[in-house]
Amino acid sequence: MRAWRGPKLPKNLLHDMYEVHTEGGGYDKDNGGQWKPGATVETKFQGVVMPLNNEDLQYVDSGTYTLNSQKVYTNGYQLKVGAEFRDGYDGQVYTVKQELTHGPIHSMKRYMVERKGASNPK
């Protein structure tokens, strides 16, 4: 008999996403203290972007949301607030605004995210 490990997102719903962050960088003393940027690194994970629903908006802590606000689900991959990631499906870049937790019930993670690069219509 198989052990139950909690709910998981279906594999056919998930696709590749890439958390984008910079590693290294610093001031170069040999070059007059000029800033030397670090290398951009992408960490691959599986997830899916979904629209926000009324229940998500009812409990939102971040205070505001726009038409560019959505949520992302992962099967346990942890993102930090402020992290950026690129959706491998359509190339959109998102910023994590808040974790929408399920509590200690299971390992599935969900986050409220904001799509970058698009202005919000009034």
Image (spheres, grey):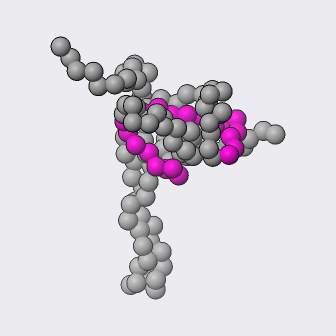
Residue range (magenta): 63-83
Front one among 120 and 104: 104
State the image coordinates of residue 114 (x, y, percent, origin top left).
Answer: 60, 42
Could you tell me which residue is drawn at 39 percent across and 36 percent down? 104
Q: Main secondary structure of the magenta part?
A: loop
Front one among 30 and 116: 116
Number of numbered callouts drawn: 0
Front one among 6 and 36: 6
Q: Is residue 54 above or below residue 94?
A: above
State the image coordinates of residue 72 (x, y, percent, origin top left).
Answer: 51, 34
Say which quadrant the N terminus sits in. Answer: top left
State the image coordinates of residue 27 (x, y, percent, origin top left).
Answer: 43, 77
Residue sticking out furthest to the left:
1
Say which quadrant the C terminus sits in. Answer: top right
Which image quadrant is residue 53 in?
Answer: top right
Q: From the viewer's perspective, is 72 left or right of 44?
A: right
**Residue 16, can we see it?**
no
Residue 65 lies in the magenta-colored region = yes
Residue sticking out furthest to the front:
104
Could you tell me which residue is drawn at 40 percent across and 84 percent down? 29
Front one among 116 and 113: 113
**Residue 117, can we see it?**
yes
State the image coordinates of residue 20 (x, y, percent, origin top left).
Answer: 45, 49
Could you tell me which residue is drawn at 62 percent across and 44 percent down? 61
Q: Is residue 99 above or below residue 37?
A: above
Residue sticking out furthest to the right:
122
Q: Is residue 107 above or below residue 21?
A: above
Residue 28 lies in the magenta-colored region = no
Could you tell me which residue is drawn at 62 percent across and 39 percent down? 60
Q: From the viewer's perspective, is 87 left or right of 57?
A: left
